[in-house]
């Protein structure tokens, strides 16, 4: 039995579900979070509230743990790098730095000869005017985006005037893909060519927020193989340790594109808790804590629905669940519009 102590940066639902998985493996968790109400405090062993530039608090955190991981990618590189000098940070800070920047991330993927959407760096308004063939497109901040935040659809040049975009930040403009489907592939890499890979998950978004995820994804054998191959190659190339998710687009001509990489566990993988013998969370903890890999077995097909905002209320009021339904409440203090409050997984 391992006695390692795992530090997790970030105290949202992913930090909560990682803590719950660690508990099952007898690994103690300390969560560091800049939100005093971070819901992971209800799931971890020890919770430290502090800002990401509070050196004193961060040192206190580092002293308590053996290994550090994180639930989200938007942590300053310098913070992770300084931590890494004292205790191992996994996935490596350099991997996080690459992936948290949309431009660096897409350049990296293209260098592997893996297709992404067409894109270009935008530093000033006039850059877009010369890029008509990327319209209709989406302008995205290069860093800090999630759940569609920091994204602006641009159908025609004039849209830029009305959107009032703050060009002191860096952006990329991406060509809009005519989507047939979105899928994701989750892989946990333990060491060279040693990984567990989950089957592709089909995802449906609403207002750029994940609404539901389902396995099996209804896709061709070619897309299934290609998406798994690309996700594995990305993980190998990064020498990644832990769980990683690759989000893909499939267009109406059956072309596959990498949309983005998440250097962490992912919302679309919540169904792995009930649908597999080992969840993406347990696998992440196993990999970063150098524990053994257990052969992955699917137990059932499944569908996961995110409960956003008030959608959680009926479930909190003891709505009756069937035997094949599993309800998760992230215990967030406040219900807010567009906030992911919990999810429900149905085995099908
Ligand atoms: P986030 O970091 O917010 O998850 P994404 O780049 O994954 O940002 O965008 C969120 C969602 O917006 C995608 O899952 C997809 O539904 C839609 N979207 C983003 N970029 C494009 C694009 N180039 N073409 C079509 N749809 C897109
Ligand atoms: Mg995304």
Image (cartoon, helix red, strand yellow):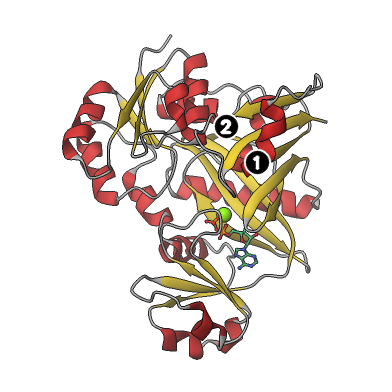
What numbered label is drawn on residue 280? 2
Position of the C terminus, as image quadrant, is: top right
What numbered label is drawn on residue 310? 1
Front one among 295 and 326: 326
Circle 1 or circle 2, nearest the eye: 1
- Which residue is at a point 52% across and 37% down the rendered structure image? 334
Front one among 200 and 112: 200
Can residue 297 be spotted in the picture? no
| Residue 110 at x, y percent in the picture | 51, 65
Q: Is residue 93 above or below residue 296?
A: below
Q: Is residue 251 above or below residue 146?
A: below
| Disc 2 crowd, CA 10 A, few/some/many (<14, 14-19, 20+) | many
- The CA distance from mark 1 to mark 2 is 27 Å
Q: Is residue 212 left or right of residue 339?
A: right
Position of the N terminus, as image quadrant, is: top left
| Residue 19 at x, y percent in the picture | 46, 24
Front one among 297 and 67: 67
Q: Is residue 211 above or below residue 8?
A: below
Q: Is residue 182 left or right of residue 347?
A: left
Figure quadrant of residue 321: top right
Q: Is residue 337 left or right of residue 319?
A: left
Residues under numbered marks 1 and 2 in contact, where contact means CB atoms less than 8 Å apart: no
For ligand 2, the image quadrant comes to bottom right
| Disc 1 crowd, CA 10 A, few/some/many (<14, 14-19, 20+) | some
- Which residue is at a point 27% across and 36% down the rendered structure image? 50
- Which residue is at a point 68% across and 54% down the rendered structure image? 205
């Amino acid at each position: 039995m391992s006695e390692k102590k795992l530090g997790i940066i970030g105290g949202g639902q992913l930090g909560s579900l990682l803590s719950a998985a660690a508990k099952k493996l007898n690994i103690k968790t300390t969560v560091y979070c800049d939100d005093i109400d971070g819901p992971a405090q209800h799931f971890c062993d020890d919770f430290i509230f502090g800002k990401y530039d509070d050196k004193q608090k961060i040192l206190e955190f580092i002293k308590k743990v053996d290994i550090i991981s994180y639930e989200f990618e938007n942590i300053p590189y310098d913070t992770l790098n300084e931590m890494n000098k004292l205790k191992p940070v996994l996935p490596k800070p350099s991997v996080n730095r690459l992936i948290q920047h949309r431009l660096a991330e897409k350049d990296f993927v293209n260098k592997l000869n893996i297709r992404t959407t067409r894109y270009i760096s935008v530093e000033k308004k006039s850059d877009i005017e010369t890029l008509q063939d990327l319209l209709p497109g989406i302008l995205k901040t290069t860093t800090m985006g999630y759940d569609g935040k920091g994204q602006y659809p641009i159908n025609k040049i004039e849209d830029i005037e009305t959107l009032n975009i703050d060009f002191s930040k860096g952006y990329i403009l991406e060509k809009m893909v005519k989507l047939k489907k979105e899928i994701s592939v989750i892989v946990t890499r333990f060491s060279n060519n040693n990984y567990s890979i989950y089957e592709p998950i089909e995802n449906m978004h609403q207002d750029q927020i994940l609404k539901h995820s389902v396995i099996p994804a209804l896709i061709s054998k070619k897309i299934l193989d290609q998406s798994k191959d690309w996700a594995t190659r990305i993980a190998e190339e990064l020498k990644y340790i832990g769980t990683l998710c690759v989000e893909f687009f499939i267009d109406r001509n059956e072309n596959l594109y990498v949309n983005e990489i998440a250097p962490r566990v992912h919302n679309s993988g919540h169904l792995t808790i009930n649908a597999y013998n080992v969840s993406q969370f347990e696998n992440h903890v196993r990999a970063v804590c150098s524990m053994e890999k257990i052969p992955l077995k699917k137990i059932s097909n499944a569908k996961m629905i995110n409960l956003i905002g008030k959608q959680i209320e009926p479930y909190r009021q003891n709505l009756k669940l069937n035997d094949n339904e599993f309800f998760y409440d992230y215990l967030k203090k406040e219900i807010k519009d567009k906030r992911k409050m919990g999810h429900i997984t149905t085995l099908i």
